Image (cartoon, grey):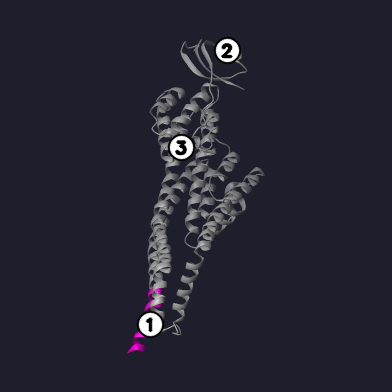
Amino acid sequence: MPLFKYIAMSAATNEATKGTISADDESGAIEALKKQKLRVISVTPQKNKSMSFSFLKSTKIKSDHLVIFTRQLSAMINAGVPLLRSLNSLEQHAESPALKAVLAELIEDIQGGDSFGDALAKHPKSFNEIYVNMVRAGEAAGILDDILKRLALQQEKSASIRKKIKSAMTYPIILLVITVGAFFGLMLFVIPQIGDILTELGGEDAELPLITQIMLGISDVIINWWFIIIPASIALFIGMLRYIKTPTGRKLYHRILLRIPGISPIVRKVVVSRFARTFSALIGAGVSIIESLNITAHAVGNVIYEESLTDAVDKVKNGEQLSHIMDHDPLYPAIIAQMLSVGEETGHTEEVLVKVAEFYDDEVDAAISSASSIIEPVMIVLMGSMVGLIAISVMGPISSLAQNVQ
């Protein structure tokens, strides 16, 4: 159905309003506006948005911009500024092109009759299910400003954890890339020349140490078959990434992460913190326990925990307490069940889970710092060992040939 842009005067407030409306034709749009007690000033067909070069434009709002937008909107609504006026002001001053474009569409949808939550739901790349449902709950309860504050805090905590993990992994990844690059450089350019020198000094019948023979063999394979090895390695890497994105591969990958020593504790603490903060925010927003569990299950970021929470939904429907369910699930630490039990007994589940989330946020910080301090020297030792191994494979036969010459 075609869309029409309109400008009209409200009979109740005598203020000008503009927006879009769906209708079969222009006269139908005018009739629909009159039914809304609006005095029509102009109605024009809305042109289709140009799709040219749209693939070059990012439609997802960055987390930092989303946090700032959420906090600013919360402050404006708390100060008594109407929602549409707040969105218009934020859209005019938005620095992010993606945020500006999304806000323009939100304004049109709300002017067309959608609620704020329904308008947000049309942009799943920018506003996830948690954001949309909490806004809907805030609208229903009349506490949208408070809900937006909770959302901003939750997003800041999640972004902080992601940044710390990325920061901790940056240095080891750089060392790994340097190590792999140095290995291939030595194998392609250094080892072959040294092999020729050893052959010239000792003759073709010279018996080289086993480690030297292995290094020369690896170098020979890489030099002669690089056009197969490199594409095959890239194809294998891409294939693994694509497999991880499939439901089966993602589940296997997440299960492996939960079993790797050193990594498993960090993953578990991150998931538990995310569960506690998300679930408490939804409960505090007035969302039912069943719906909160369903939404949280898709937000924890681990398929194994997602399946566990989905199973918990069915048990809660049958009358079981969530604290009792988690007490018998090895995925969750004992503190979760104990704190949930206290929250259920006192009626302060939200406050209790916030404390759990804060505790595990600190635990995640400590675990990431500890892992980072361990990974860095391990990578340095690995790099040094590789260089040392190559040096031994080269110096051994040279020393042996020098003794024979003497």
Q: Residue at x 46, y 44 (%)?
A: 354
Q: Which residues are magenta?
A: 389-406
Q: Quadrant of the N terminus?
A: top right
For marks 3 and 2, give the CA distance.
35 Å
Residue 371, given in percent of the width and then of the height, sits at: 42, 59
Sequence-wise, the earlier of marks 3 and 2 is 2
Work out whether residue 163 or residue 98 is closer to the camera in this orientation and state it.
Answer: 98
Judging depth in this view, the residue of 391 and 167 nearest the camera is: 391
Between the C-alphas of marks 1 and 2, the distance is 96 Å
Q: Residues within 10 Å of mark 3 (few under 14, many from 20)?
A: some
Report x, y in % for residue 265. Answer: 48, 58
Numbered badge on residue 201: 1
Q: Quadrant of residue 368?
A: bottom left
Q: Secondary structure at mark 3?
A: loop
Which is closer to the viewer, label 3 or label 1?
Answer: 1
Q: Residues within 10 Å of mark 1 (few under 14, many from 20)?
A: some
| Labels 1 & 2 near each other (Cβ < 8 A) | no
In whole angstroms, how far apart are the C-alphas of marks 3 and 1? Answer: 65 Å
Q: Which mark is residue 30?
A: 2
Which disc is residue 61 wearing? 3
As for residue 404 lying within the magenta part, the answer is yes
Q: In this view of the protein, which residue sits in the foreground, 361 or 12? A: 12
